[in-house]
Amino acid sequence: MENRYINEDYALLGAEMIRTEPSLQHILDSQATIVFLSSDCEKRSNGRLVYAQCERVPWKWKWAVPCDFTVTVFDANVARFTDEQMRILLLHELLHVGIDRDGNEERYFLVPHDVEDFREVIDRFGLEWNGQAGKAKRARRGSARPDGARE
Ligand SMILES: [Zn+2]
């Protein structure tokens, strides 16, 4: 069974990203609360590693979960990430935090991807920022390394 834990290191990095990234200014200007979690699950989707996940906390759970969004990092899948890749990953997840304003009212939602990734991430860091493109090519040749190490 998957276990998730509050991760203060991710919370610090996430807060730094929100403070310093212009594209996250809408979060800085809002009342939205985000909790950062670690998961011990080696999550995959369609055979591909899932690094992290941003979720909107449903209103019906607000009595139990004191935040508006959770960002969960699947620790085992990012074990070889560099600091820079972790920052990009958190930027990616925080770009999912959507906020609509109507006067003083804020409405929260999950922003879907505009392309395979977010255009901002691709424009700034390239489609292969996560080191997975080379791995996929190796997999097609039948010589993928099971450790998923970066080239
Ligand atoms: Zn995403």
Image (cartoon, rainbow, N blue to C red):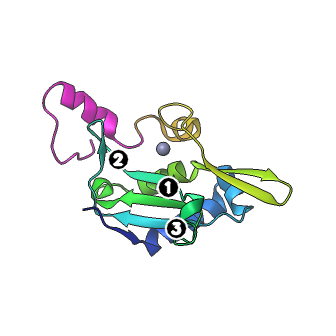
- Can see residue 10? yes
Instruction: Write down the region rendered in magenta.
Output: 129-151
**Residue that numbered label 2 is attached to:** 50
The yes-or-no answer for disc 2 within 8 Å of ligand 1 is no
Q: Please state which amino acid type lies under the numbered disc 2.
A: Val
**Residue that numbered label 1 is attached to:** 90
Name the residue at the top extreme: 141
Nearest to viewer (mark 2 / mark 1): 2
Report the Cα–Cα distance between label 3 and label 2: 19 Å
The yes-or-no answer for disc 1 within 8 Å of ligand 1 is no
Residue 135, image x, y percentages: 25, 36
For disc 3, the neighbor class at 10 Å (few under 14, some 14 to 19, many from 20) is many
In the image, which disc is placed on residue 35? 3
Q: Residue at x 49, y 51 (%)?
A: 88
Q: Please state which amino acid type lies under the numbered disc 3.
A: Val
Q: Earlier in the sequence, mark 3 or mark 1?
A: 3
For disc 2, the neighbor class at 10 Å (few under 14, some 14 to 19, many from 20) is some
Residue 58, image x, y percentages: 55, 57
Q: Is residue 11 magenta?
A: no
Q: Earlier in the sequence, mark 3 or mark 2?
A: 3
Eyeballing the image, is 51 above or below 30? Answer: above
Quadrant occupied by the N terminus: bottom left
Name the residue at the left extreme: 143
Residue 62, image x, y percentages: 58, 67
Q: Earlier in the sequence, mark 2 or mark 1?
A: 2
